[in-house]
Amino acid sequence: MISLDYLRQWQAKNYSNDIIIGILLALALLPGAIAFSFIAGVSPAMGLLSTSVIMLVISITGSRTIMVTAPSSGVSLVAAPIVAHHGLKYLILATLAMGIIQIIFGLCHINKVLDLIPNTVVIGFMNALGILLFTSQLSNVFHISSMTYVFVIISFIIIWLVPKFTRIIPSPLVAIIVLTICAWYFKPNIKYVADLSTIHIMLPKLYLPLDILTLHSIGVILFYGLMMAIVATVQTTLTARLIDELTHSTSNKNKESIGQGIATIITSSLSGIGGSALVGQSRFIVSMGVTSRITTFVTGVFLFVGLFAFSNIIGKIPMAVLATVLITISLTTFDRRTKSYIQAAPLKNGTVIITTMMIILISNNLAYGVLFGTIFYYTINNILKNRRSDT
């Protein structure tokens, strides 16, 4: 039964503001949705569809009212190997498994377990995520053409310069628009989105490739589904905690996990990919005074319509610009607390942070880093406590 509190969450203090911010948020999500698609190894159309569906569903099912959820760097990095080694059908079913596991996490009060993850492991997780995201884009920058370097430099300048004049219009979007127009006019020797992926835009339909299910495939699907669910849950919980602090309110992380699980299941049934909460975009709508679920709902609708309206343009976007957008995101992913935490306890904190990062970078698996980094933290803790008690 729908509660009065839930109905109030659809009532905005300023409806026009929440609607306008919803449109701006959709524009802000466009570059990431396209770029994260390439990381995961799927078409930009699939990334945009996934973003619109997740935003629509999470605006209804989410617990944290003003939090943005969409395909993310963490989930995309975990999804990339399954597409590369097994194909798209495996990813669709792994995303379905991810959604089911997220719901199970919520029902089992996963938040109590996540509270056990120390900040040093979180710092190592975020830093490794930034490194993986950064290195994933180097192939789109180097050894292509001299004009690629020109576009990369100009893109970085635009992304750096625009926020000094306005923060309402996302600087990555400005870079994409300006340099796509320049590329169309001057026709330089660079790579475009269309060179790497054919853009097919069609109405989504229900589809689950159950014909591939075997004992082996089920094992692969459940493994990657679990890895994506862990990464998404960690990123979402960290973002929810931040929004709680910014808004001086509390949210139910377990209900959020269930809500995201529902959104992920629906997305997978439409051949989409999963996602998690996004820190930057969530902070943006908080800073713009959003007060209702209307904003994320409008974002989902606008992106769905835009998927068809912008289809002819997507293929003409230079890959060099998308690379700079993701490199910029990777640089902001690094945790600013790294230096202060290592200085506070070089042996304990430094070892855990570096170990977590190394596990992730060697295994190329973010979930492994969280799991083994946490185990390592408590092992180190016990060793140090035993030494103190002996002395």
Image (cartoon, rainbow, N blue to C red):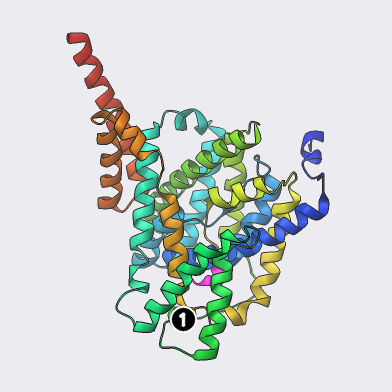
Q: Is residue 217 visible?
A: no
Q: Nearer the viewer, residue 129 or 307?
A: 129
Which x, y percent locates residue 1? 78, 36
Would you say 250 lies left or right of 280 here?
right
Name the main secondary structure of what is drawn in magenta. Answer: helix
Which x, y percent locates residue 340? 36, 34
Task: Residue at 54%, 87% (x, y): give it.
Answer: 184
> In this rendering, is residue 243 above or below 69?
above
Identify the residue under disc 1: 192
Which residue is the extreme one toward the front?
A: 165
User: Residue 228 colored magenta?
Assistant: no
Q: Quadrant of residue 12?
A: top right
> In this rendering, is residue 304 above or below 230?
below
Q: Nearer the viewer, residue 374 or 106?
A: 374
Which amino acid does the dot numbered 1 rest on?
A: Tyr
Q: Quadrant of residue 147?
A: bottom left
Q: Nearer the viewer, residue 247 or 362?
A: 247
Would you say 4 lies left or right of 107 here?
right
Q: Is residue 111 visible?
A: yes
Q: How many marks?
A: 1
- The stretch of residues the image draws in magenta is 43-47
Q: Nearer the viewer, residue 199 or 159?
A: 159
Quadrant in which the C terminus appears: top left
Which x, y percent locates residue 66? 67, 45
